[in-house]
Image (cartoon, rainbow, N blue to C red):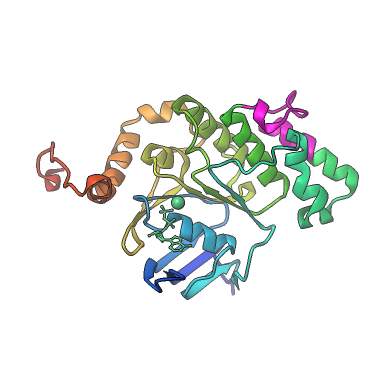
């Protein structure tokens, strides 16, 4: 008899409410969120601002706890943060007083992730990840000497050097200019291992509000809606891998982006100024 392994991440009926400390006012950030993520999958979560994307990520990271529901990794309840789940945010979060190589090596040299390696292996790992993210030659620089794109390369190398099996990324490219962002999307897929067999890829959960970024990167896109945060739809991104910039010119790329935009458009308009969208196309059902 064969048993199917537990999904890498299992979220079932997750609810999360926040209580404001002074007023006691309750915000229902997530309501009944269920999602299974398989080992080696690249999942993007999109949705309007405030729909609970960061809350989902923080729960998986163990930085916060659900109010109700089941939250498991490899079939075991997530009880807190761990080196098995690495997190990367928009704002670099580098230590300004440390060089590139010291930032990348920090967890390895001083934290739990390094315990499984000898000192020499740790230093080799640091060199390996510096090269992998394209920072060779900048090892001795300080964060203020780097562009935003290079800083995020440092943050990515640090994340990977710690050897997590799940990569959690909350709008990591959100602060970058458009061109740098496109380059780093391609770099991210290379580094994640899109040419490697699926069994060798890491599970990635990537939050973005950029629909095309989500379609470009993901195996599946989770579209959320807000107030309260729910999973509105989960779309398979059936674009072949490896993907490069040419994939954006494929009709299927446009179709998928359009489909996601339709799912979040009305809410996105309301979030900006309370208005309803101007309908420029004929009836949607005509498609
Ligand atoms: N620590 C917190 N305390 C109170 N409310 C919070 C807290 N974190 C998030 N929220 C609220 O929960 C909802 C979801 O927030 P968040 O997950 O940050 O959304 P997103 O990342 O999609 O923009 C929002 O209404 C937000 O104001
Ligand atoms: Mg957020």
Q: Is residue 233 visible?
A: no
Q: From the viewer's perspective, is 219 left or right of 86?
A: left
Q: Is residue 213 above or below residue 57?
A: above
Question: Quick check: is 153 in the magenta stretch?
Answer: no
Q: Nearer the viewer, residue 189 or 113?
A: 113
Q: From the viewer's perspective, is 274 left or right of 98?
A: left
Q: Position of residue 188 (x, y in %)?
A: 56, 37
Q: Position of residue 263 (x, y in %)?
A: 27, 50
Q: Position of residue 74 (x, y in %)?
A: 60, 66
Q: Quadrant of residue 237?
A: top left
Question: Quick check: is 135 in the magenta stretch?
Answer: yes
Point out the image quarter for the C terminus: top left
Point out the image quarter for the N terminus: bottom right
Q: From the viewer's perspective, is 69 left or right of 264?
A: right
Q: Residue at x 68, y 39 (%)?
A: 157
Q: Residue furthest front?
A: 22
Q: Residue at x 36, y 27 (%)?
A: 249
Q: Nearer the viewer, residue 92 or 39?
A: 92
Q: Nearer the viewer, residue 130 or 17?
A: 17
Q: Read off the magenta span.
A: 126-146
Q: Is residue 155 visible?
A: yes
In this rendering, the count of numbered labels is 0
């Amino acid at each position: 008899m064969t048993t199917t392994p537990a999904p890498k991440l299992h979220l079932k009926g997750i609810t999360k409410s926040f209580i404001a400390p002074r007023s006691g006012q309750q915000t229902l950030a997530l309501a009944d969120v269920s999602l299974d993520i398989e080992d080696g999958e690249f999942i993007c979560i999109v949705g309007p601002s405030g729909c609970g994307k960061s809350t989902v990520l923080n729960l998986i990271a163990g930085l916060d706890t659900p109010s109700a529901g089941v939250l498991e990794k490899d079939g075991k309840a997530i009880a807190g943060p761990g080196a098995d789940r690495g997190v990367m945010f928009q704002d670099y979060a580098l230590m300004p007083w440390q060089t590139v190589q010291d930032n990348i090596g920090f967890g390895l040299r001083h934290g739990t992730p390094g315990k499984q390696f000898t000192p020499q292996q740790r230093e080799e790992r640091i060199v390996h990840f510096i090269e992998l993210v394209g920072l060779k030659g900048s090892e001795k620089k300080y964060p203020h000497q780097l562009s935003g794109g290079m800083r995020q390369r440092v943050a990515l190398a640090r994340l990977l050097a710690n050897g997590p099996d799940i990569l959690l990324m909350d709008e990591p490219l959100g602060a970058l200019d458009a061109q740098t962002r496109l380059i780093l999307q391609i770099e991210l897929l290379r580094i994640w291992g899109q040419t490697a067999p699926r069994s060798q890829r890491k599970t990635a959960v990537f939050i973005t509000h950029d629909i095309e970024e989500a379609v470009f990167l993901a195996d599946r896109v989770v579209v959320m809606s807000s107030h309260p945060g729910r999973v509105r739809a989960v779309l398979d991104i059936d674009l072949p891998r490896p993907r490069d910039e040419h994939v954006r010119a494929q009709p299927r790329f446009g179709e998928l982006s359009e489909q996601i935009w339709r799912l979040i458009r009305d809410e996105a308009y309301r979030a900006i100024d309370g208005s309803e969208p101007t309908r420029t196309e004929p009836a949607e059902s005509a498609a």
